Amino acid sequence: MNFKYYNPVKIDFGIGSLERLSQWIGNRKALLITSNGFEERGVVASVKEKNPMITRVINNIQPNPTLEQLEVLYKELEFESFDVIVALGGGSVIDIAKALSIYKEKSSDEPFKLIENMLFNGYQSDEILYKPIIAIPTTAGTGSEVTPWGTIWDDVNKKKYSIHTDKLWCEVAICDPALTLTLPKELTIQTGLDALSHCLESLWNVNASPLTSNYATNAILKIVDVLPRLVNNLDDINLRSEMMLASLKAGLAFSNTQTAIAHAMSYYMTLHKDIPHGIAASITLPDILNVALTNAELKLDLQKCFGENPVEILNKLFGALHVTTSYTEYGLTELDFSLIKESLSQTSRAKNSLIDSNILFENISNKIRN
């Protein structure tokens, strides 16, 4: 029962919590980062009108933000012109906000070199400064609003980079379920499955603790129950609220464990096969779960979530969501999984896993052959 847990993010949860943004901004000049969709739906105009301290808007963030996009934005920013960043969007928006929050007050180096050094080499220095971030997630799945790292993708060299420092925690997470009402069915499914993966990844994890496991098991029970009902009732604000709370608990779980083998395997699938992150991070879950059940302790936790037949219940969930877990349907071959297995040695997330990867990959190969 010896464990540590830390999460300094202030959480403002509830329908209409976006209306309290001005209280969190205070008298600070704010930069708003978001995506085109919110500009088109008039959300940005409404937020700006109610929050006059927002002095600039960046509204062109794309899914899976790339090094190239980050470099363009970073070089355009005048860091002295704002005091706080407001990130309104999904995980991609919040991740790039974290990267854009990093700066040096005085530096003879080209500014973007600092980011590159942190991404490529894990560079740290007391000279590095961070603008505070107010995260406003618009999906129920990312968890980025309560975690201390951000993901940037290199689509040229097919690599994924992560920034992780103890200064990258957001100052505030405003979780307003009403913002997820416009999320289409496919994204509702993808982000919901990503949240489920976050939960399971924090269970079969060397860094798990009673507290993270409690958050995770509680969230799994809710996701398995709510997500299939939500995809058939996208306008149900109560179901949206339940999913956002489950996603938040998933974030609170893996904020202290990190993810594990499912996410480590997913990066190849997204970079090389263009499989959306939430799908890539979840289609291996039934096979991983099957291996996890051979561990007596994990089996107890997993049966708390799924009952006596966890794999059967998980497969039923995918069936109810009309998401196939057949790897060949995504163009994944034995060769792909051989390359994925090789890549795990370079992925820190894989080292968090309690799963026997040799058994897992053998099972996957047999599944593809049959």
Image (cartoon, helix red, strand yellow):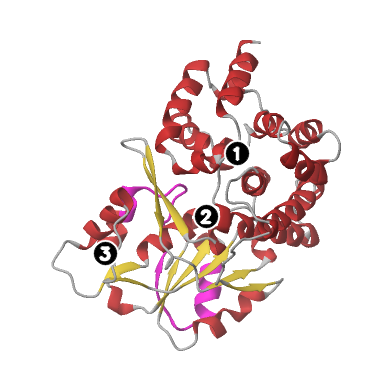
**Residue 301 included in the magenta stretch of the image:** no
Let me know if residue 62 is in the magenta part.
yes
On the rendered structure, is 150 left or right of 12?
left
State the residue position of label 1. 354
Give the residue drawn at x 48%, y 26%: 341
User: How far apart are the alpha carbons under marks 1 and 2?
Assistant: 26 Å
Name the disc covering residue 91, or none.
2
Q: Which mark is residue 188?
A: none
Which numbered disc flags the more N-terminal residue, 3 or 2?
3
Taking the view exactly as shown, the residue that stands out farthest to the right is 308
Residue 148 appears left or right of 100: right
Bin the neighbour count of mark 1 within 10 Å (Cα to Cα): few under 14, some 14-19, many 20 and up.
some
Q: Which residue is more in the foreground, 184 or 18?
A: 18
Query: Relative to 93, does residue 321 appear above or below in the rendering?
Result: above
**Location of the N terminus (image quadrant):** bottom right
Report which quarter residue 282 is drawn in: top right
Alpha carbons under labels 3 and 1: distance apart: 43 Å
Which comes before the other along the chain, label 3 or label 1?
3
Residue 113 position by quadrant: bottom left
| Mark 1 in CB contact with mark 2 (< 8 angstroms) | no
Residue for badge 3: 76
**Label 1 residue SS:** loop
In this view, the residue farthest toward the bottom is 27
Q: Which residues are magenta?
A: 42-70
Q: Residue at x 25, y 60 (%)?
A: 114
Q: Is residue 96 at least partly visible in the picture?
A: yes
Query: In the rendered view, does 357 fall on the left or right side of 17?
Result: left
Dot 3: few (<14), some (14–19), or many (≥20) neighbours within 10 Å? few
Q: Nearer the viewer, mark 1 or mark 2?
A: 1
Quick check: can you spot residue 181?
Answer: no
Residue kind at label 2, given as amino acid type: Gly
